[in-house]
Amino acid sequence: MSEPLNKNSEPGEEPRIKLPEAEPRGYFEGESMTRRHVFTVASQAIGGVAALAVVLPVVGFAVAPLFTRGEERWEAVGPVSDFNAETYKQVVFTEITGIGEAGKTTAYIRTGAEKFNEEPNDVIAISTRCAHLGCPVRFVQAAQNFICPCHGGVYDFEGKRLGGPPVRPLDRFQTRVRGGQVEVGPRFSVTNQLKAVRVRDPGEFTGGIWEFLYPPRPSTFPPPSN
Amino acid sequence: MSLLKRKKKDESPEGSGEAEAVAKPTKGERMGQAKDLSVHHGTQGAIDVAGWVDSRVNATGIFTAMMSRHVPKGTNWFYTLGSATMFIFAMQAITGVFLSMYYTPSATQAYASITHLTNDVFMGEFVRGMHKWGASLMIILIFLHMARTFFFGAYKYPRELNWVIGVVLLILTTVMGLTGYLLPFDQRSFWATIVANNITASGPVVGPYLADFLRAGPDFSATTLSRFYALHMMVVPGLMAALIGAHLFFVVKLGTTAPPWVRAPRPKGARPSESVTAGVASEDLEEVPVNGAAAAAVTEADPPVDEANAAEAEAVEATEAEETESATATEEPAAEAATEEAEEEPPTDGEVSS
């Protein structure tokens, strides 16, 4: 590299063949990089391509679940006549398949009540997943409240937060009536005004600026239209 | 190696004589020295096999550079916490590999396989117990090790990078704790994982996606357990092993720091009045011969002191008040020189020629 390219004679002699002086060193006229630099860059580029050929598929493989939405599941939980507007009835159904008991979840179901401006034909299914960190809450008849055993989150009859660490009301499940049977479908979250929004994990706020701080996940179902 | 060097120095106090010995050691001399060294390491029985390997990879040189390092005066039991943590890591790796022989990473079978492993398999409870209690012990030890590093000021120049690696190792250790906690798949581990995932999800902007990545989907599913298992078994231990290797390399390369209460020996070039201050016990200055040996080693090697060391020595002179720093600085050339020697030896000569 450091030797001039026209060195074809003994040291101290006049060069026998005069080549143009490389100026700057190693670069001849019209060249933008030296031969060695070309090979360096090329071999590094090939190595990079080879590494990416392994890394990209593997990473894509690992993060694929972020972009995959499962199949919408609806499960019948009993005839409409089982439920009324005054109190909740507890149902257990499978939310996640393939993991046995761990995939089951509990919901509290009632029909629409006039005092909450709901249609009598509506079926309201409240999730027991606490909006703080996901512990299972329990509906306490005497208090008419949902109470979480872990950190003392309390929700009122509609599932709105009354106290404790939770950041939003209890989630709900979409419902429909098919052939006299109440069916429970995908989960959705609600704002403090009980407006349906896309589902999010416990601990995440809903509504307002939080819609931007907790962006939508492609893996979840869109919320039902209000 | 340092042993040899000192011995040689005793025989020929003058530098010129020593240089001659280095230039032309006879074969007999070299053999004798190799034998001395093997006696020193207690490996004379395996000298032939070891010699065969040694003449190819210089294993003894590497071993000596790693294990026969100069350590500062005042080194105490607190300096064993890092090794203790590493020992627990090795124990976790070994017991973990054997536990995986009986464990089934499936949401429907995991609990049953753990019950079987604990109750039916010979010594299963003991091996699982070692892994379970070792996990807690490792967290405790790694924190104690970090506390030692912090309170002894051992994170300072030139060891900052080792501190950073250590912090990453601490995080990875807690990740091991988190991912391993789910594997028994009982009520406690299931709900703990749910809560941990939801804490992850509540981080703004990236939280929801990170939680989706951990769970492999919007909810805890069949893939979650296998994902945690893969992280616990392969990804994180592999990363940790690599980083522990780097951590150790830096320990060997940079040497250990003296405790803050040990007076540093006089750095090279410092005026005597600067380091010998009132209240210094004379025995604290016994480090100087070590530096003398290091200095001799350095004069042998081509570059007397490399730039970093020179700069460091200057820095030390400037901040004489900081005792730990100067201990650091004077310790380093010794370690450095030892490494250089190990690298420069012709392979066939083994330990002897330097």
Image (cartoon, coloured by chain):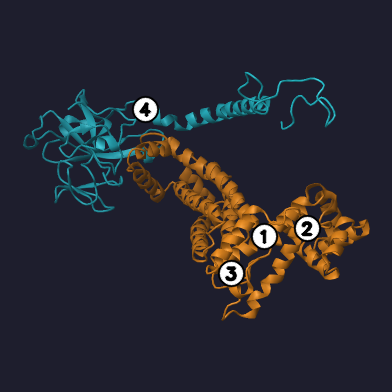
- Give amino acid for label 1: Pro
Say which chain tag 3 marks.
B
Q: Is residue B24 left or right of residue A94?
A: right
**Going from the N terminus, do you reach mark 1 or mark 2 first?**
2
- The CA span between labels 4 and 1 is 62 Å
Disc 4/disc 3 C-alpha distance (Å): 56 Å
The answer to whether residue B26 is left or right of residue B238 is right
Seen from the viewer's position, the closer of residues A23 and A112 is: A23
Q: Disc 3 vs disc 1: Cβ atoms closer than 8 Å? A: no
Query: Which of the labelled discs sits on residue B333, or is there none?
Result: 1
Where is B196 relative to A100, above or below? below
Q: Which residue is mark 4?
A: A70
Q: Is residue A142 above or below residue B325?
A: above
Chain to which the residue tagged by mark 2 belongs: B
Q: Amino acid at mark 3?
A: Trp
Q: Colour of chain B?
A: orange
Image x and y of residue B78, in percent: 56, 67
* Chain in cyan (letter): A
| Amino acid beneath label 4 | Gly
Mark 1 in CB contact with mark 2 (< 8 angstroms): no
Residue that numbered label 2 is attached to: B300
Q: Residue furthest left?
A: A115
Q: Residue at x 79, y 64 (%)?
A: B5
Q: Identify residue for label 3.
A: B77
Q: Nearer the viewer, residue B29 or B228?
A: B29
Mark yes or no: residue B35 visible: no
